[in-house]
Image (spheres, grey):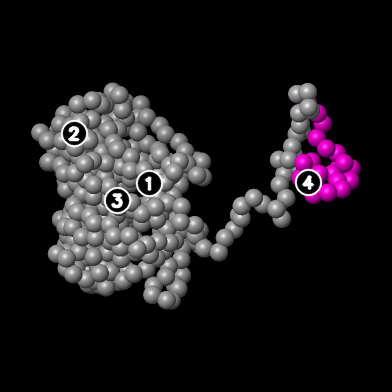
Amino acid sequence: MLIEQGGDGAAAAPPSPERLAAAASLPELYGLLEPLSVGPGWAKPTPSIWPSPKETFRPAHWDYARAKAALDAAGHLVDTKLAERRNLILANPVEGNTYATARTLVAAYQMILPGEQARSHRHTPNALRLIVDAEPGTYTVVDGERLPMLPGDVLLTPNWRWHGHGNDSTAPAYWIDVLDAPLVQLLEPMFLEHHPEVYEPVRANAEASPMWFPWAETQRRLDAAAPTPEGPWGTAVALGDPAMETIGLAMIRLSPGIATAPHRTTANNVFAVVQGEGESSVDGESIPWRRGDVFVVPAWRPQSHRSDDGAVLLRVTDEPAMARLGFLRETAGQGEIA
């Protein structure tokens, strides 16, 4: 039963149906509804439905050179006993936000030192990582399979898969993580479990895996793909489908000097630069980028991408979730396509 407080702090009974029905004015009715946690739908302080998506999250860019320097400093200050992962969260610069890169996605730079192991765990968020700099001997273990981590490789750790990392090389390794943790936080089915043996035992060294997309193979696929330089994403090949239900990812190749077609989508997109440099126009703002950088294009912001000499980007998007929910909408030129 809902209880309201009397003027002297004592508990008072909520208004009776008769008292509510006898309200002689709207202010009186509003006052009676408040302790019931009921609000008048005809007098909402803010709209609950609006004509087009709000521009809450901002386009933003993060520089790999600065992140790498900060991780190098953290390598001397933060060990694996202190932190489950040594990473830098790329929080969108909107007021009050300390975590999400876009509404449903979070990106981070991560580093592991030579001789280190990152403890194994599993969680409900889907995750993936793009390797930026690493030497042979750096690896991820996913459900007992050891997978190499070399520059340009993409590795997946879908929902509830055990995963941990290690570095048997002589150089630090750096990569970019992207997870759908903000989406899981919004929906609330968040679970995390640490491996009972701390580091998951390796039962096989994988030569191929649906969780691992080697850069050399991705390059071959891009070379074989039908070129669409003026399409919305340039020439693209999908990775991982259908390994993750909420995240789509693709490598996109920008042809030298050709900008992609301007468009916008209700899907959120995080981009990581695999190769080359260029710039993107996002909602009228120019974002320059180069290898290792990360930038985000929030939902419904007009975007176009260009590189003078050619480039490759990894596109990570919540498009599969939007499509399954029936929320995916895109514009191309003046026309709208579902």
In percent of width and height, residue 53 lies at 49, 60
Of the numbered discs 3 and 1, the one sitting upstream in the chain is 3
Residue found at the very far bottom of the displayed protein = 334
Q: Residues within 10 Å of mark 4 (few under 14, many from 20)?
A: few
Spatial CA distance of label 3 from label 4 is: 48 Å
Tell me if residue 159 can be seen: no
Of the numbered discs 1 and 2, the one sitting upstream in the chain is 2
Which residue is under mark 3? 61
Q: Residues within 10 Å of mark 1 (few under 14, many from 20)?
A: many
Q: Quadrant of residue 241?
A: bottom left
Q: Amino acid at mark 2?
A: Asp
Secondary structure under badge 2? helix
Tell me if residue 35 can be seen: yes
Spatial CA distance of label 1 from label 4 is: 40 Å
> In the image, is residue 173 above or below residue 238?
above
Q: Amino acid at mark 1?
A: Asn
- Mark 2 touching mark 3, by CB under 8 A? no
Task: Indicate left or right for 229 with 27 as reference.
Answer: left
Spatial CA distance of label 2 from label 3 is: 20 Å
Task: Indicate left or right for 132 with 93 as reference.
Answer: left
Please tell me the numbered disc located at residue 72: 2
Which residue is under mark 1? 92
Identify the residue shown where x is 12% and y is 41%.
136
Spatial CA distance of label 1 from label 2 is: 23 Å
> In the image, is residue 5 above or below residue 230?
above
**Magenta stretch bounds:** 11-32
* Front label number (2 vs 4): 4
Please tell me the numbered disc located at residue 27: 4
Q: Quadrant of residue 122?
A: top left
Of the numbered discs 2 and 3, the one sitting upstream in the chain is 3
State the residue in front, 275 or 165: 275
Q: Residues within 10 Å of mark 2 (few under 14, many from 20)?
A: some
